[in-house]
Image (cartoon, rainbow, N blue to C red):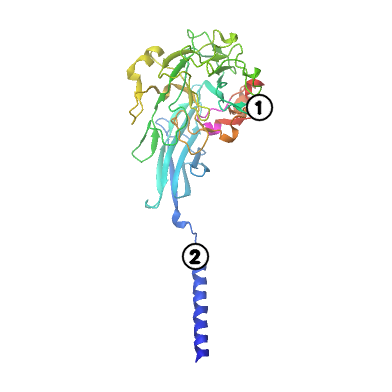
């Protein structure tokens, strides 16, 4: 009897193991993440007048900010693309270039933040991406140095020697007269979506086309033809101390050079940031059109600035910034701080600089569809954000350097190992 019970028990155990093995095999033959994946269908919508543009080959980048995973796609002949994504939040950016029109190159960009892929959605997620038209500019920002260097003792030197370079990327003379410079609010890239944005009817977060300039508006002086840049020429702008920093700190730069410019006004009384400019810049100060706070030093982020060049159109620039109707307080804030609001159509060039993919943009896609990334690993190493050379355009220009200008910083810039003005 005991033997019979033993045999029966053994049989039951064997059957149970076999059943478990079958269940395990059934499970492993399926994709365990199948229920955590959804298809995203993307359709590009071109602006009026460009509906018949050849739509194949537009670059589409999808990023998961939580882990840095990036997907690069190309649109097909119908301007569409498809990808399967795991549940989560994603950002999307698109860049496409058109055929030159009257000497200008049309550029189509768009960026969308917080695309939600979730199991609460039925079927595929279909989104239409309304591309924004802009044109490759004559004046571009060629280089930004903002992350500092190391002193001889290894300690950081990063607040006082910042600069950017403006470059004439065209084959015609450009004039700096009347060109304005500023940075977009906030000084450093925010951890949350900018309040200067809204959710559209499809639930996509869109940055407003009128952008807020924080703290100061600077302007090049001149009567309209005083400060020429020939094709391929550049202008260096010292954002803080226009002195020779290399005397004490060899890894830094000399910003007291004839022909350089400086953001300087005696109203900024912090002598470390704004000592009297060197003698070579005595007549090359940018005019301070507007100051929006009681700060004693002009702020330019050492981690993630968003600088822009712009022209104030159809009205005197000083009159424009002085008009309270052209200033605004931050949405949702009780602060009395005001910002000068600039239509994106006035912007000649702008660069969204981030030090982490988890941060949020401030510039709309018409100015910069993505961003240039310089992480903290490259901080205090004399490195810069530098524009890439366009080899095809440079060859067509007979060797005059032409830089990439797609209004998409991820395409247009790279991290340079040393400041270009030292060479």
Marks 2/1: CA–CA distance? 60 Å
Q: Nearer the viewer, residue 224 or 216?
A: 216
Residue 70 visible (yes or no): no
Instruction: Name the secondary structure under disc 1.
Output: loop
Residue displayed at 40% across by 47% down = 125
Q: At which x and y percent is residue 336?
A: 34, 23
Dot 1 crowding, Cα within 10 Å, few <14, some 14–19, many 20+? few
Q: Which mark is residue 27?
A: 2
Residue displayed at 51% across by 79% down = 13
Residue 346 visible (yes or no): yes
Where residue 280 sits, quadrant-wise, is top right
Judged left or right of residue 336, residue 25 is right
Q: At which x and y percent is residue 277?
A: 56, 12
Judged left or right of residue 412, residue 120 is left
Where residue 185 sits, quadrant-wise, is top left
The question of residue 409 being in magenta is answered with yes
Q: Which mark is residue 423?
A: none
Q: At which x and y percent is residue 273?
A: 53, 18
The magenta region covers 403-411
The question of residue 209 being in magenta is answered with no
Instruction: Name the secondary structure under disc 2.
Output: helix
Quadrant location of the C terminus?
Answer: top right
Q: Which mark is residue 153?
A: 1
Which residue is situated farthest in the bottom direction here? 1
């Amino acid at each position: 009897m005991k033997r019979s019970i033993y045999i029966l028990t053994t049989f039951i155990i064997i059957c149970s193991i076999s059943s478990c093995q079958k269940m395990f095999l059934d499970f492993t033959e399926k994709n365990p993440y199948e229920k955590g994946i959804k298809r995203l269908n993307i359709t590009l919508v071109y602006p009026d007048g460009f509906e018949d543009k050849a739509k194949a080959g537009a670059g589409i980048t999808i990023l998961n900010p939580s882990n840095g995973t990036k997907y690069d796609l190309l649109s097909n002949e119908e301007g569409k693309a498809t990808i399967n994504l795991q549940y989560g939040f994603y950002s999307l950016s698109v860049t496409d270039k058109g055929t030159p029109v009257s000497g200008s190159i049309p550029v189509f960009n768009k960026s969308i933040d917080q695309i939600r892929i979730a199991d609460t959605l039925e079927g595929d997620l279909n989104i239409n991406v309304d591309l924004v038209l802009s044109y490759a500019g004559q004046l571009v920002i060629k280089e930004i140095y903002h992350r500092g260097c190391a002193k001889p003792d290894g300690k950081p030197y990063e607040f006082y020697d910042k600069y950017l370079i403006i470059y004439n990327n065209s084959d015609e003379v450009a004039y700096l007269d009347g060109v304005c410079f500023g940075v977009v609010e906030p000084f450093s890239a925010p951890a949350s979506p900018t309040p200067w944005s809204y959710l559209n009817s499809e639930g996509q977060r869109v940055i407003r086309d009128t952008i807020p300039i924080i703290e100061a508006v600077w302007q090049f002086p001149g009567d309209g033809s005083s400060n020429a840049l020939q094709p391929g020429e550049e202008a260096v702008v010292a954002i803080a101390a226009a002195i020779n920093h290399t005397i004490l700190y060899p890894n830094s730069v000399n910003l007291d050079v004839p022909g350089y410019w400086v953001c300087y006004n005696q109203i900024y009384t912090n002598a470390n940031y704004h000592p009297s400019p060197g003698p070579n810049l005595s007549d090359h100060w940018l005019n301070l059109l507007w100051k929006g706070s009681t700060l004693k030093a002009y702020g330019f982020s050492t981690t993630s600035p968003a600088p822009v060049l712009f022209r104030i159109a159809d009205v005197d620039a000083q009159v424009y910034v002085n008009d309270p109707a052209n200033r605004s307080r931050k949405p949702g804030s009780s602060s009395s701080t005001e910002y000068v609001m600039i239509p994106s159509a006035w912007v000649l060039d702008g660069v969204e600089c981030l030090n982490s993919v988890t941060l949020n943009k401030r510039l709309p896609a018409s100015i910069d569809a993505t961003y240039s990334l310089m992480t903290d690993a490259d901080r205090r190493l004399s490195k810069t954000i530098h524009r890439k050379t366009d080899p095809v355009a440079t060859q067509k220009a007979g060797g005059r350097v032409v830089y990439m200008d797609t209004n998409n910083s991820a395409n247009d810039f790279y991290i340079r190992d040393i400041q270009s003005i030292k060479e």
